[in-house]
Image (cartoon, grey):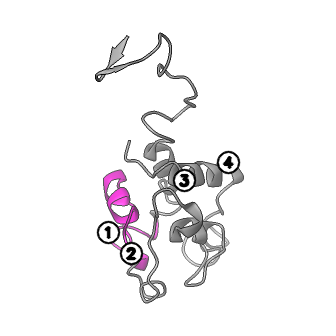
Amino acid sequence: MVLGGCAVAEGEGEGEGEGEGEGESGPAFDDTFAIFSGGRCDGCHNADSFQGNLDLSTRDEAYAELVGVVASGPFCGQAPHTRVVAGDADASLLYQKVTFVMDCGLGMPEHEGPGPPGGGAEPLTDDELTILRDWINGGAADH
């Protein structure tokens, strides 16, 4: 069979090795964005409150403000740190903040402050951290 001018053996490249939410090259951003939405992150990082100069209120806005973008918030903007370094979760400020291993600002989500009774949103689960890490290490593609 020929795909895009390249010969491919039958069955090869037809979904092999692709997990749920994976496609072109690595995990889909939609899976990652689902972690941020629903009030967990976008409750503070939105167009109205704009905490950390970051708007995660829509999928497209979140992607545009994360991948390859240097942080401009009051705590980490002076460093500078890139929010998402495609291919390197450990170098990505976003991943550092949600794993509470950062050298500026606060870990996210905050456990105090706005949010549900008791303050703040719940930290990401191990499964959510894996989705985020795999998306970043997989190239942080917008698919």
Q: Is residue 131 above or below residue 53?
A: above
At x 71%, y 53%, the residue is 126
**Which residue appears farthest toward the left when viewing the image?**
5
**Is 66 displayed left or right of 138 in the figure?**
left
Q: Is residue 62 above or below residue 12?
A: below
Q: Which residues are magenta?
A: 43-70
Question: Looking at the rendering, in which quadrant would you find the N terminus?
Answer: top left
**Residue 95 lies in the magenta-colored region:** no
Q: Which residue is mark 2?
A: 70
Label 1 CA crowd tier, 10 Å (few <14, some 14–19, many 20+): some
Label 2 CA crowd tier, 10 Å (few <14, some 14–19, many 20+): many
- For the residues labelled 1 and 4, the Cα–Cα distance comes to 28 Å
Sequence-wise first label, 4 or 3: 4
Q: Which mark is residue 47?
A: 1
Mark 2 and mark 3 in contact (Cβ < 8 Å)? no
Which percent across, then down, holds residue 80? Answer: 44, 83
Q: Amino acid at mark 1?
A: Ala
Q: Amino acid at mark 2?
A: Val
60 or 23, nearer to the observer = 23
Q: Secondary structure at mark 1?
A: loop
Q: Is residue 44 above or below residue 37?
A: below
Sequence-wise first label, 4 or 2: 2
